[in-house]
Image: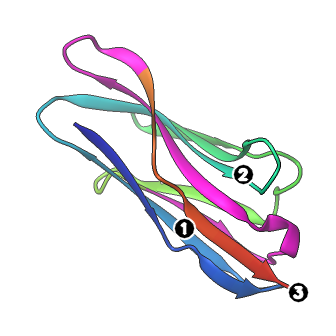
Amino acid sequence: QVQLVESGGGLVQAGGSLRLSCAVSVSGTSFSIAAMTWYRQAPGKQRELVARITMSSGTSSTDYPDSVKGRFTISRNNTKNMVYLQMNSLKPEHTAVYYCNADMRTMPTWKLDPYWGQGTQVTVSS
């Protein structure tokens, strides 16, 4: 069973910072995480990619849309199966539900599948 749990959301004033965390837990099977991605969905808008970190043996790479470059940073702790999103200089337009996504392979199929967390609300007040 695969479970992703986000935390760290909340209410922050414009200009402030938040650090989101995503914990991946897997029970009863072997697994491999290929990539983890943070998405956000604001009211009335489509879900959009915020940050992505790919994972391969010994190396990782990150990717951000231009809208958050220099403001958001994604990082990981492979030992703890955790991914973080550091968000600085937040603006009201960053208000959204932030979701954690993991592209993972699990036994027995070892097929690459996406898994989602339940989301965490981030509200930035002006």
The amino acid at mark 1 is Leu
Number of residue marks: 3
Circle 3 residue:
126
**Scheme of colours in the image:** rainbow
**Real-space Cα separation, disc 3 to disc 1, in angstroms:** 20 Å
Please tell me whether residue 97 belongs to the stretch shown in magenta.
yes
**Mark 3 and mark 1 residues within 8 Å of each other at the beta carbon:** no
Question: For the residue labelled by badge 2, is the local secondary structure a helix, a strand or a loop?
Answer: strand
**Mark 2 and mark 3 residues within 8 Å of each other at the beta carbon:** no
Question: For the residue labelled by badge 3, is the local secondary structure a helix, a strand or a loop?
Answer: loop
The 10 Å Cα crowd at callout 1, few under 14, some 14 to 19, many 20 or more, is: many
Camera-nearest residue between 61 and 32: 32
Circle 2 residue:
41
Q: Earlier in the sequence, mark 3 or mark 1?
A: 1
Question: For the residue labelled by badge 1, is the local secondary structure a helix, a strand or a loop?
Answer: strand
Residue displayed at 65% across by 59% down: 97
Please tell me whether residue 109 belongs to the stretch shown in magenta.
yes
Residue displayed at 70% across by 86% down: 12
The amino acid at mark 3 is Ser
Residue 5 placement (x, y as % from top left): 39, 57
The amino acid at mark 2 is Gln
Camera-nearest residue between 106 and 2: 2
Residue 114 placement (x, y as % from top left): 47, 29
> Dividing the image into 4 quarters, which one contains the N terminus?
top left
Circle 1 residue:
20
Nearer to us: label 1 or label 2: 2
Q: Earlier in the sequence, mark 1 or mark 2?
A: 1
Residue 111 placement (x, y as % from top left): 36, 13
Q: Is residue 39 left or right of residue 69?
A: left
**Real-space Cα separation, disc 1 to disc 2, in angstroms:** 15 Å
Residue range (magenta) = 83-112
